[in-house]
Amino acid sequence: MQSLINTIALLSGLVSLSVVGGSFYLYINKDTLIEDARVKVTTEVATAVREALPALVESLTPDMPDTTGPDIPTITGPKI
């Protein structure tokens, strides 16, 4: 029974040390991790916009008309 309690205590200590060590690692490297994530997100957003832009422009551009209307009438005033 004592060996079971010692094993649980040892595992508990290892988990606690792992949490403290991981937190310390994240705290020390937070600026680098944030910058890497920002660069990755910026790259992905730029790629998505670059791929979507031609289709968006094509959908917003009106089609050329097949026929045209009559000439624009000229306004003629009284002759002096």
Image (cartoon, grey):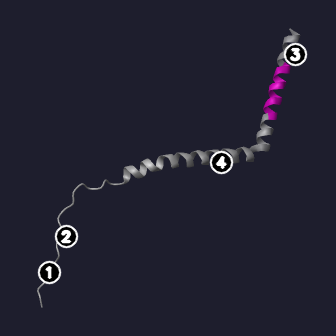
Q: In this view, does 69 lie above or below 56?
A: below
- State the CA–CA distance, disc 4 to disc 1: 65 Å
Disc 4 marks a residue whose amino acid type is: Val
10 Å neighbourhood of mark 3: few (<14), some, or many (≥20)? few
Q: Is mark 1 on a helix, strand or loop?
A: loop
Q: Residue 59, image x and y in percent?
A: 37, 49
The amino acid pointed to by label 1 is Thr
Inter-mark Cα distance, 4 to 3: 47 Å
Instruction: Choose top left, top right, bottom left or bottom right for residue 27.
Output: top right
Q: Quadrant of residue 79?
A: bottom left
Q: Earlier in the sequence, mark 2 or mark 4?
A: 4
Residue 31 versus residue 11: which sits nearer the camera? Answer: 31
Could you tell whether 47 is left or right of 53 in the image?
right
Q: Which of marks 4 and 3 is in front?
A: 4
Give the residue number, with chain letter if any, for mark 1.
76
Labels 2 & 1 near each other (Cβ < 8 A): no
Label 4 close to label 3 by CB (< 8 Å): no
Q: Give the range drawn in magenta.
A: 9-21
In this picture, residue 52 sits left or right of residue 20: left
Where is mark 2, residue-wise? 72
Callout 3: helix, strand or loop?
Answer: helix
Q: What element carries label 4?
A: helix
Q: Residue 39 carries which label?
A: 4
Q: Mark 3 points at which residue?
A: 6
How far is the residue under mark 1 from the one under mark 3?
Answer: 108 Å
Instruction: Calculate the distance from the C-alpha at mark 2 to the C-alpha at mark 3.
Output: 98 Å
**Is residue 18 in the magenta section?**
yes
Q: Earlier in the sequence, mark 4 or mark 3?
A: 3
Q: Residues within 10 Å of mark 4 (few under 14, many from 20)?
A: few
Q: Give the alpha-carbon distance from disc 2 to disc 1, as whole Å.
A: 12 Å
Q: Which residue appears at 83% of the width and 30% of the height?
A: 17
Crowding at mark 1 (Cα within 10 Å: few <14, some 14-19, many 20+):
few
